[in-house]
Image (cartoon, coloured by chain):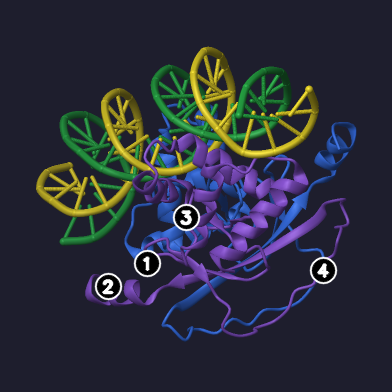
Chain colours: A blue, B purple, C green, D yellow
DNA sequence: ATTTTGGTTGACACAAAATACCAAATGCCA
DNA sequence: TGGCATTTGGTATTTTGTGTCAACCAAAAT
């Protein structure tokens, strides 16, 4: 989804949910939407601190959490111990590279459909699911070839 | 898989791969295997530091990574920014609670099968995949009902 | 059984990632 | 435009994970 549409969505959601539409929130949404990949909070902070001096790291972390709560942004499951964020909240699988930790989309083709139940037998309510494909990106494969084993 | 079997597997793998079978490694494997859930390294450290005074936090982190490299343990994708570990390395989906962060297994029934390609069009080699079901556990649902919205 | 040796551990320091706190600033609505 | 609850910035702190290195120990060879 384009940055334009995302800004529009942000505006609507802020109004309807009664939260403030601050410049910081707009800037953070833009910084996330214009990136094709799925950056971490600190990566976004690096991008933003240039464009918008004075932007606080705390704010980036906080606003991203707010976006997740509002359903504007998705947290991506990743094997790495840090949070990656995605402005595309539609259901789609991700590729995670074990070499460099890079996270990217995989929308090339269908490889199966899951239909999880809305509720498990022990009362766990399922509201969402995620598919993560794990492996090695082209760069890391080549690198691996040249080094050990 | 039971702790018994896991200890046996650890012993075999250590022998065949030429790594030492230390008391720490046995204790860490046991601590992980006896838990039904999928604890973090620090949770395991808390469990272990009681049973085995002197156990170092560094060792827990290090040994878990070793287990992952040896294929004895799996890292579980979770939306939280910390690593969860699973002694069951067979492919199975996980439930992640957005309320309390708890991670548990979901083996109740089939809800679809995925057959990801071994390689994507842009040269990403897929070696594994994970399915994460996200939602709210019974406890957190009740708690939510009683609080706001 | 004793010795040897390379892998392993424990303790600490350090780095990275995320959160808590609170005064100051600001968006929003009347 | 003014009042006020929300939001932000900055700092401190916690949480999570890694680097280093001397001391230790499991495993194999005497």
- Identify residue for label 4: A109
Rounded to the nearest angstrom, the CA distance separating label 4 from label 1 is 36 Å
Chain of the residue under label 4: A
Q: Are marks 2 and 4 in contact (CB under 8 Å)?
A: no
**Residue C8 x %, y %:** 60, 35
Rounded to the nearest angstrom, the CA distance separating label 4 from label 3 is 41 Å
The answer to whether residue A61 is left or right of residue D21 is left
Which of the two residues, B148 or B56, is positioned nearer the viewer here? B56
- For residue A16, the mark is 1
Q: Quadrant of residue A5?
A: bottom right
Rounded to the nearest angstrom, the CA distance separating label 2 from label 1 is 26 Å
Mark 3 vs mark 2: give the one in front: 3
Chain of the residue under label 2: B
Quarter holding the C terminus of chain B is: bottom left
Q: Quadrant of residue A123?
A: bottom left
**Residue B124 x %, y %:** 83, 51
- For residue B31, the mark is 3
Quick check: do tags 4 and 1 share a chain? yes
Secondary structure under tag 2 reads helix
Rounded to the nearest angstrom, the CA distance separating label 3 from label 2 is 30 Å
Q: Quadrant of residue A142?
A: top right
Chain of the residue under label 1: A
Mark 1 vs mark 3: give the one in front: 3
Secondary structure under tag 4 reads loop
Mark 2 vs mark 1: give the one in front: 2
Q: Residue at x 37, y 65 (%)?
A: B99
């Amino acid at each position: 989804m384009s940055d334009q549409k995302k800004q529009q969505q942000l505006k609507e959601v802020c109004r309807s949910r009664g939260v403030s539409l601050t410049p910081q929130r707009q800037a953070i949404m833009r910084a996330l939407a214009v990136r094709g990949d799925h950056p971490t909070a600190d990566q976004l902070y690096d991008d933003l601190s240039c464009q918008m001096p004075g932007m606080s790291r705390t704010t980036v972390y906080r606003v991203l959490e707010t976006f997740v709560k509002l359903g504007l942004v998705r947290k991506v499951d990743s094997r790495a111990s840090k949070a990656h964020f995605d402005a595309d909240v539609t259901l789609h699988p991700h590729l995670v590279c074990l070499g460099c930790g890079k996270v990217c989309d995989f929308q090339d083709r269908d490889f199966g459909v899951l239909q999880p139940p809305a509720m498990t037998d022990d009362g766990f309510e399922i509201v969402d699911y995620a598919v993560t494909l794990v492996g090695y990106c082209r760069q890391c494969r080549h690198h691996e070839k040249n080094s050990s084993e």
